[in-house]
């Protein structure tokens, strides 16, 4: 039995936590996971914080491989996720069926929230693409340390934007749906082994378990698609 140390952004948390007890029962291993916002996690690993496994968006995993922190042959694509829109539970749901409809909903909202992760970075790009960057500055709240939907559940914002998998578990909100295809941003989430991993064999077992066909149902239920 090994104790696997993992560091992960929260995007895959719901599926991860559903699969973890199954893996621990089947393997006899224990997995200890730190949940860290992606921006902070990337920085901490680059600065030398040790673990066996790192779970992040593909771009960040590739950066950690390039800077020598992760083993290149250990990179595994686990799941893909799109950006979703949520409102406070019971609130009217805006039309988000097209780019123009999303633009109208954004301009009509009193305040909106989004994350500091990949979806939040994309929202700032999207405001520019839609030509409403200036209008959105005063009413945008970039949330760190909790899901963007938590601010919407408390009534602090009218619309929340984040990975669908990060909105679904938030109490007090309703998922309106994913952004329409024409302005959707799909992010791939990956994992890799640190070169200093103490339990590399056991860590690879955990990755193989998440990649197995048996895990696909949990990944889809969480609002993601198996990679």
Image (tube, rainbow, N blue to C red):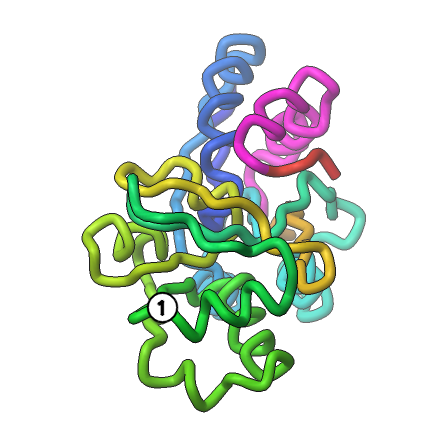
Name the secondary structure under disc 1.
Answer: loop
Q: Quadrant of residue 142?
A: bottom left
Q: Quadrant of the C terminus?
A: top right
In the rendered image, residue 205, in percent from the top left (x then y), is placed at 66, 25
Q: Magenta residues: mostly which secondary structure?
A: helix
Query: Is 78 or 73 nearer to us in this picture?
Result: 78
Q: Quadrant of residue 136?
A: bottom left
In the rendered image, residue 113, in percent from the top left (x then y), is placed at 36, 64
Query: Is 69 or 167 nearer to us in this picture?
Result: 167
Q: Taking 190 as reference, is 138 left or right?
A: left
Residue 221 is inside the magenta segment: yes
Relative vertical location of residue 6 with respect to residue 208 in this rendering, above or below: below
Determine which residue is flagged by label 1: 109
| Name of the residue lying farthest toward the bottom | 134
Relative vertical location of residue 199 with respect to residue 59 in this rendering, above or below: above
In the rendered image, residue 183, in percent from the top left (x then y), is placed at 67, 64
Residue positioned 56% across, 56% down in the render: 96
Q: Taking 9 as reference, is 89 left or right?
A: left
In the rendered image, residue 87, in percent from the top left (x then y), is placed at 36, 50
């Amino acid at each position: 039995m090994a104790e696997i140390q993992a560091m992960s952004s929260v995007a895959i948390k719901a599926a991860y936590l559903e699969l973890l007890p199954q893996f621990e029962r089947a393997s006899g291993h224990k997995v200890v996971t730190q949940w860290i916002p992606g921006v902070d996690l990337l920085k901490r690993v680059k600065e030398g914080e040790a673990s066996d496994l790192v779970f992040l968006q593909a771009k960040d995993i590739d950066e950690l491989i390039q800077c020598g922190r992760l083993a290149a042959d250990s990179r595994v694509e686990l799941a893909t996720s799109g950006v979703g829109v949520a409102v406070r539970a019971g609130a009217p749901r805006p039309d988000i069926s097209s780019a123009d409809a999303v633009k109208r909903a954004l301009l009509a909202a009193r305040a909106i929230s989004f994350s500091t992760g990949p979806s939040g970075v994309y929202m700032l790009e999207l405001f520019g693409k839609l030509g409403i960057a200036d209008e959105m500055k005063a009413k945008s709240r970039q949330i760190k340390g909790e899901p963007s939907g938590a601010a919407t559940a408390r009534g602090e914002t009218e619309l929340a934007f984040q990975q669908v998998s990060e909105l679904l578990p938030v109490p007090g909100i309703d998922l309106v749906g994913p952004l329409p295809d024409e302005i959707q941003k799909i992010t791939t989430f990956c994992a890799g082994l640190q070169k200093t991993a103490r339990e590399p064999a056991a860590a690879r077992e955990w990755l193989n378990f998440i990649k197995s066909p048996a895990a696909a149902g949990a990944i889809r239920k969480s609002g993601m698609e198996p990679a």
